[in-house]
Image: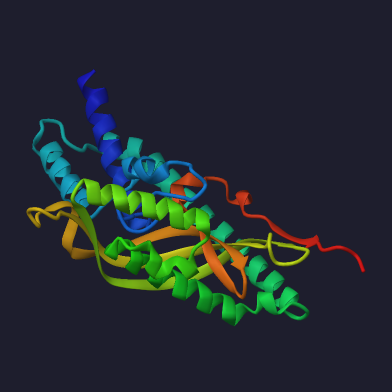
């Protein structure tokens, strides 16, 4: 039984390292850091499977403890762990390939739609996405959702307002510094008659120094105050007036099957 426990512990360490290397590390408290306007309640759920920068220290300490135990990594252990490493690496590669395919298909569909529909001008979409991203992060930090009201749907506005008000009740403040949008890649879209029901899903890749403090003591209660962490999220945009606005934010671990993202451009009524 002791050998099995050691093997499980070593396997967990290896899997954790794989997730960190493959770029799946996410910070936990930023705007949308686990939440969505659809009421999925993922704000708490994502933190259980997310890794903050402190995970690296935990992994290092676990590795050190394991190394000090009698019967640490042997050749047999390594052979047992090779399939675990290969499976984890293969999974990350498959996801990257599928994402790239979704991106290329989505961009092609957007380009075709933009020929007859100005609402699908790709450059304007990217501008709307960037503006929404930065303004929503600012509104989250200031706990004033009115700062980004024009960049969010009513559903997302109400969701963020409720969450930031609850943070105020608990005397907590989420600090975001050096926020950078690295990439915004389309993953799927749905084009309907008119603009009221059009949908666009984007893969957001960004980084930030993200931590939470107690406003009474100014002490850090979550995250790292000096470490920038990369994160990825799926943002859903809808058309409101002349702008694409954020309607929902999901963590990548909430959508395991990328077929969730549809490309449907055949819903216009025939003339």
Quadrant for the C terminus, please: bottom right
Residue at 11% across, 38% down:
65
Q: Nearer the viewer, residue 35 or 93?
A: 35
Residue 116 relative to residue 139: left or right: right
Q: Work out whether residue 57 or residue 7 is closer to the camera in this orientation and state it.
A: 57
Q: Residue at x 10, y 33 (%)?
A: 69
Residue 183 vs 197, above or below: the answer is below
Outermost residue on the right side: it is 271
Farthest residue to the top: give it. 1
Callout count: 0
In-front residue for pair 262/70? 262
The way the protein has been coloured in the rendering is rainbow
- In the rendered structure, the answer to whether residue 124 lies left or right of residue 28 reads right
Q: Is residue 17 left or right of residue 67?
A: right
Relative image position of residue 211 (x, y in whole percent): 21, 58
Q: What residue is rendered at 34% in x and 50% in y?
A: 163
Q: Quadrant of residue 226?
A: bottom left
- Residue in view at x 30 percent, y 37 percent: 11
Please name whichever residue, 71 or 135, is drawn nearer the observer in this view of the structure.
Answer: 135
Percent x, y of residue 236:
54, 59
Rendered-image quadrant of the N terminus: top left
Residue 229 in view (yes/no): no
Position in image of residue 270 (x %, y %): 90, 65
Above or below, comparing residue 76 to residue 16 in the picture: above
Q: Quadrant of residue 83?
A: top left
Left or right of 23, for residue 9: left
Residue 237: x %, y % from top left: 56, 63
Task: Tell me, yes or no, if residue 4 can be seen here.
Answer: yes
């Amino acid at each position: 039984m002791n050998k099995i426990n050691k093997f499980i512990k070593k396997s967990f360490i290896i899997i954790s390292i794989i997730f960190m290397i493959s770029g799946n590390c996410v910070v936990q408290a930023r705007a949308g850091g686990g939440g969505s306007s659809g009421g999925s309640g993922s704000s708490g759920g994502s933190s259980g499977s997310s890794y903050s920068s402190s995970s690296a220290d935990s992994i290092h300490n676990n590795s050190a403890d394991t190394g000090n135990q009698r019967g640490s990594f042997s050749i047999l252990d390594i052979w047992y762990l090779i399939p675990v490493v290969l499976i984890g690496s293969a999974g990350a590669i498959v996801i990257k390939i599928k994402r790239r395919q979704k991106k290329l298909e989505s961009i092609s569909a957007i380009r075709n739609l933009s020929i007859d529909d100005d609402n699908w001008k790709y450059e304007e979409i990217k501008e709307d996405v960037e503006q929404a991203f930065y303004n929503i992060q600012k509104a989250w930090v200031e706990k004033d959702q009115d700062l980004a009201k024009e960049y969010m749907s009513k559903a997302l506005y109400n969701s963020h307002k409720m969450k930031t008000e609850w943070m105020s009740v608990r005397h907590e403040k989420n600090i975001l510094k050096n926020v950078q949008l690295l990439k915004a890649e389309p993953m799927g879209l749905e084009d309907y008659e008119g603009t009221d029901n059009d949908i666009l899903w984007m893969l957001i890749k960004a980084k930030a120094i993200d931590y939470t403090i107690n406003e009474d003591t100014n002490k850090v209660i979550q995250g790292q105050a000096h470490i920038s962490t990369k994160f990825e999220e799926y943002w859903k945009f809808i058309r409101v007036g002349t702008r694409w606005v954020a309607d929902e934010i999901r963590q990548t671990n909430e959508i395991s099957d990328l077929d969730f993202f549809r490309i449907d451009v055949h819903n216009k009524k025939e003339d």
